[in-house]
Amino acid sequence: MVKQPHIVIFNPDQWRSDVMGHLGNPAAITPNLDRMAATDGVSFRNAFCQNTVCTPSRCSFMSGWYPHVRGHRTMYHMMQPDEPVLLKTLKARGYFVWWGGKNDLVPAENGYSAYCDVKYEPERTPRPETNLHARDAWRGDPEGDNYYSFYAGQLEKAETEDAYYDGDWANVLGAIEQIRNAPADQPLCIYLPLLYPHPPYGVEEPYFSMIDRAKLPPRIPAPTDWSGKPSLLKGIHDKQRLQGWDQTRWNELRATYYGMCARVDQQFGMVMDALREVGMYDETAVFFFSDHGDFTGDYGLVEKTQNTFEDCLSRVPFVVKPPKAEPVQPRVSDALVELIDFSATVEALLGIEPAHSHYGRSLLPLIAGETDSHRDAVFCEGGRRHGEQQCMERESASAGNSGLYSPRIQWQLQEGPEHTKAVMCRTHTHKYVRRLYEQDELYELGSDPGETVNRIQDPALSTVLAELKERMLTFYQETCDAVPHRANRRM
């Protein structure tokens, strides 16, 4: 039997694709990712998630299913014991699976033993005050214009600390320790679902001052006329109260987010160095990707939404390094890929015949440089139908109107058009979004990469619109269900 490669799944939260140096962003400081893309990996410029919030996206890329297949489209509907999860597959395959970081994948009440050998808990507990969601003095006056901004700014380390010791640092250091003490008789899988750069936007030195504010690319401005955009965006824009922010304040928020990404890049580099130190790097397949992106000031917004699909939310970093035995042509690939291709690629590397129907496609031919064509379109979906009270996420509303997420959650609790069910179909040149209860969207991405002009009513694009609607119909017909591979006895 061919020796199975080690696997590292490095999974930051809410990292938008464009904050990487090797993709041409002059303000991004990501030397470790840049190095991998230049030497022994492939970075996918056009990688897209299948949902723009945490749980549905993770359920999708760990199963190879789109969110609609089994209704995984809220933060509180996770993978059930009878459903396929890649980590469970790897554990059954003989991998020693180490999981350090957040969940947002399986019901916590079921435990983690089916999915990993170790669900890591650090011996040294992170300081409670490092949880920015739990302490909110940085938010200021509840009536002020920073209260819903998620902007915390520079974080102060303790005098005895080299870093702001939070859960991410604890889990990264735990992963490094596990690599140094890897089982001698089992392949190792490290799963690191980190929190950063998920807001609140806050980071310690040296990362806070690392970003040159003058090099930040322009923001996509808030529309002067919101009529062409989803109503949820204007609703959040009104409630977040950031209309008075000048460019200097926006640049500080954005630079802080970039600093958070720089911190994650360094942590990624530390894990890669640990693999090199113990002689495992060449035998390891590395997957770096986030679950979704972040507004970070685009459209005058912060954080994310659950049913809008702007590129800053739906396009994600995706860098893959195969084990040395696999062919690779290091580069930035422009192919359209989806996060569900992650699990299919792992299966292809290991020669696993999937035990369930799924819709991912192996990236190995792209990685080898055999082709630069993969998908003709990518898809992302979210939202809910009227009457689906179980999808309102009332659990997130417990903080009331004072909660950080309340500008978004308030709309999700209403039966208006704001939380409509929607799906995106995106090609290299156009993006079409079909929506229940409100106007669809159509963008010509060549002339309008910021998706600022909705041309759904433009007769000049009627042929394109018809083609995208037909492509979406095919997508749903191909993926509308997943018939179990095991048949039932009839008698």
Image: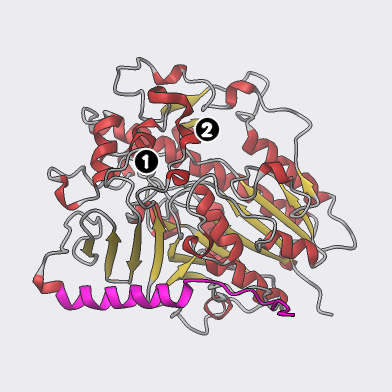
Question: On screen, 448 above or below 251?
Answer: below
Q: Label 1 belongs to which residue?
A: 412
Q: Position of residue 247 (x, y in %)?
A: 24, 34
Residue at the spot 52% in from the left edge and 30% down from the top edge:
205
In the rendering, which numbered label is found on residue 206? 2
Mark nearer the viewer, 2 or 1: 1
Question: Dot 1: what SS?
Answer: helix
Q: Position of residue 80 (x, y in %)?
A: 65, 55
Residue at the spot 76% in from the left edge and 53% down from the top edge:
116
Instruction: Indicate the quadrant containing the N terminus: top left, top right, bottom left or bottom right.
Output: bottom right
Quadrant in which residue 436 is drawn: bottom left
Q: Residue furthest left?
A: 459
Quadrant in which residue 36 is drawn: bottom right
Instruction: Indicate the quadrant containing the C terminus: top left, top right, bottom left or bottom right.
Output: bottom right
Q: Which residues are magenta?
A: 462-491
Q: Position of residue 404 (x, y in %)?
A: 42, 29
- Magenta stretch containing residue 464, yes or no? yes
Camera sees residue 334: no
